[in-house]
Image (cartoon, rainbow, N blue to C red):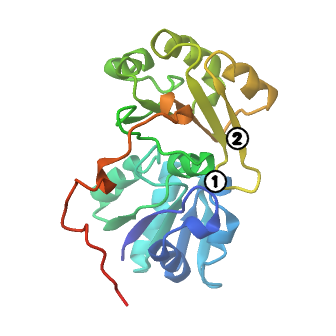
Amino acid sequence: MKVFIIGAGPGDPELITVKGARLVSNCPVVLYTGSLVPLAVIERAHPDALVLDSSNMTLDEIINVIVQAKEKNQDVARVHTGDPSIFGSTAEQMRRLDELGVEYEIVPGVSSFTAAAAALGKELTLPEVSQTVIITRAEGRTPMPEKEKLEVLAQSGATLTLFLSVLHIRKIVEQLLPFYGESCPVAVVQRATWPEQKIVTGMLSDIAEKVKSEKISSTAIIFVGPVLDCHDFADSKLYSPDFSHGFRKAKRIK
């Protein structure tokens, strides 16, 4: 028996991995995170599978379902949104599984932040502009470690990616203005790849009002940084004629 912690992707049901889709189809027990995972993903489950929405379950209740599956020697597809490694609330589940001696495997998925960048048509790392992407969140009910306060991270000038933070957009703007300036580009992508996806772009000076006007209050990724509106950047060395590597020569596969 094994628990498969599966990243279902950001919303588009075709963005789950082939392995993740196969496991959802084959596992006799499927636990998924409510409205965050598209039903089209869960509909892949076998008609005889036990399929449970965990959005209203406590951690103890989730673990109890897994323990019962272990007693029956049944594999469990534990389906999470996006990728389980980023703000996935999976660590506490894995800690409990370790304590119980339950074997598990993480199946990665497409993160909502990479899906949001794709929706924008942007590369988050541009040569000589920004080579660093910081994934973080604004401080709310969950306190931030002192060295990870937004004002500290902002000193790098890197591309910032904020999860779970759109309700704090005004505070975010206040914290970032001294480091990025009023004209710094900002993009907010709500429910990336879902049919109701919404994109709002602007600058630090006006993004808060635009977000308010569009009534965006949840399930949104915030990007901040010059890469969002930069056209004057150096070409990558990867395709430069004077740059050689082992894969330079084109090879015909078929």
Type of amino acid under label 2: Ile
Q: Position of residue 242 (x, y in %)?
A: 22, 53
What residue does disc 2 label? 199
Q: Residue furthest bottom?
A: 254
Near-viewer residue (128 or 165): 128
Q: Residue at x 62, y 52 (%)?
A: 55
Q: Position of residue 82 (x, y in %)?
A: 52, 54
Question: Which numbered circle lies on residue 36?
Answer: 1
State the image quarter where residue 10 is shown: bottom right
Could you classify mark 1 by the number of other residues whose Cα lies within 10 Å: few (under 14), some (14-19), or many (20 or more)?
some
State the image quarter where residue 252 is shown: bottom left
Q: Residue at x 64, y 62 (%)?
A: 12
- Answer with mark 2 or mark 1, whichever residue precedes in sequence: 1
Residue 254 placement, left or right of 34:
left
- Quarter holding the C terminus is bottom left
State the image quarter where residue 105 is shown: bottom left
Q: Residues under labels 2 and 1: Cα distance?
A: 18 Å
Q: Residue at x 55, y 21 (%)?
A: 184
Q: Residue at x 79, y 31 (%)?
A: 215
Residue 147 placement, left or right of 10:
left
Residue 96, above or below 188: below
